[in-house]
Amino acid sequence: MLNHDYCTKDVFNTNFFKDFRKTMTDREKEIIKDFRKCNFQEMFEFFQAESERRKAATKDEKLAKKNENEALVKEYGFCMIDGHKEKIGNFRLEPPGLFRGRGEHPKMGMIKRRIGASEVSINCGKNSKVPTPPPGQRWKEVRHDNTVTWLASWVENVQGQVKYIMLNPSSKLKGEKDHIKYETARRLDKVIDKIRATYRDEWKSKEMRVRQRAVALYFIDKLALRAGNEKDEDQADTVGCCSLRVEHVQLHRELNGKENVVVFDFPGKDSIRYYNEVEVEKRVFKNLELFMENKKEGDDLFDRLNTQVLNEHLKELMDGLTAKVFRTYNASKTLQDQLDKLTDGDATVAEKLLAYNRANRAVAILCNHQRSVPKGHQKSMENLKEKIRAKRDAIDDCESEYHDLKKAAKRGSVKEKVNADKKGKQLERLKEQLKKLELQETDRDENKTIALSTSKLNYLDPRISVAWCKKNGVPIEKIFNKTQRTKFLWAIHMADENYRF
DNA sequence: TATCTTACTTAGTAGTATTGGG
DNA sequence: CCCAATACTACTAAGTAAGATA
């Protein structure tokens, strides 16, 4: 990891060295006391060379490797469940390595140990053949619990959390759960007006607890914030709605010509920054002033609220309603609305795809799904611009040639007419290509820091996309790749062009 | 009632595989 | 056909939320 950013962080190096020393003999401990005097360069170079060697392998060697891997997947990558063969999502144990917590994680750099069979629990059917542990080892436990979906589990040593082997998203089990998730979100659509009316009413409640709950719910609904469970001290300091602290919001009576503006600025899941300047209703603003009265940095904004309390309340508003259902609901709703708004039925497939991506992007922005700017983005934009310039020149040339040929064709023979025709077709083709390039340019730049796949995979009812494709004559492969198609097979079968979320 | 445990979904990144334009 | 750019896959951390336990 020597070339990684992690290595510039003190916490990372300190944690690593502490764990490293634990693995030493007494003699080694006496010698190796100062991390700064350790030089791992030679090991680093060894692994780099390994990687180079892999890259430089011949076609045959690469093919052999591929076959080897496929054989492994074939043997270990599947299981039988309820008489059906299903793909497993992660059939390999997590190998040892250095813990790479996100953000300012206090445990980054700690050594993640290798797991042995004696630490692994197996969960299989009573009558199924128990997988054989490695020679000379025994499983920690073999159980037959058909109320859970995991096939194997172990406890990871850095955070002490249980890790599971589970099914692939393409499995029936996962597909059914996904389906249920979207059906719950659709049920929310039926009661959302009432819920909104209720929480607006509760902004006026005499009870502080109720007011806080109502304002928090407003944020969850309007901004698609996460619930915000409490976290331990030994994790990165991130927050969601219920765990917001006073330093995460700023109140402005007026900001940039808008009134009653709340500026949110906090580290969310994966320590991704959430920054948003939001104009809110006067009553919400007043409430926030009240909530923040006599509080200092570090105090909870919603001191009378947590996710359990909120979810208990939500359960009473609708069966199965929790905070995260709002995120699913508003994401899918946004996609549907944006597709309705942005799709022009007469447009080309390329233009329709741009519209789809824009709708998808609106959701990603709502949910704050970010990514780091891809390596070489700027260069690839420049290349694209250059291509566009070249294409424009080609069109200019072609146009004037076409013009001349047409003139010649007017007084000329059949042959000249055919030539003019040909040129005309070429011109059309060039113009098509230019348009495609220009669309690509817009799309790529707008997307550089936005991750579309997260919402596509987890928040957007796939039936909306399926219906849109069918209605607009867009092949499904244009919006779902192969993996996504197997994950969403249920939706592809289920939805016709008239499906509405 | 608070805290812990469990099981599951959601998230971004890194490395590999594929593609498509010269 | 080659190689750079893009797309996809594997990986695993980090959330949500329910239920058990102190």
Image (cartoon, coloured by chain):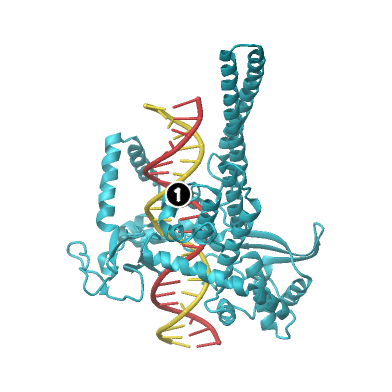
Chain colours: A cyan, B red, C yellow
- Kindly identify the residue that appears in the image at 56 percent across and 49 percent down: A472
- In x, y percent, where is residue A30? 35, 58
Residue A291 found in image quarter:
bottom right
Q: x and y percent of residue B16 in the render?
A: 37, 44
Quadrant of the frame with the C terminus of chain A: bottom right
- Res. A251 in view: yes
Q: Chain for mark 1?
A: A
Q: Position of residue A229 (x, y in %)?
A: 55, 73
Would residue A9 be seen by someone viewing this image from the given angle?
Answer: no
Viewer-nearest residue: A255 or A103: A255
Does residue C12 sit above or below A405 in this rendering? below
Residue extending furthest toward the top: A412
Q: Is residue A452 left or right of residue C13?
A: right
Q: Nearer the viewer, residue A426 or A156?
A: A426
Q: Residues within 10 Å of mark 1 (few under 14, many from 20)?
A: few
Taking A113 as reference, is A283 left or right?
A: right
The residue singled out by tag 1 in the image is A481
Residue depicted at 57% across the width and 42% down the height:
A350
- Which amino acid, by three-letter code, is at mark 1? Asn
Q: Quadrant of residue A455?
A: bottom right
Q: Of A8 and A467, which appears nearest the observer? A: A467
Where's residue A385, x and y in %?
Answer: 61, 32
Q: Is residue A347 left or right of residue A485?
A: right
The residue at the far left in this view is: A136
Q: Residue at x 45, y 57 (%)?
A: A492
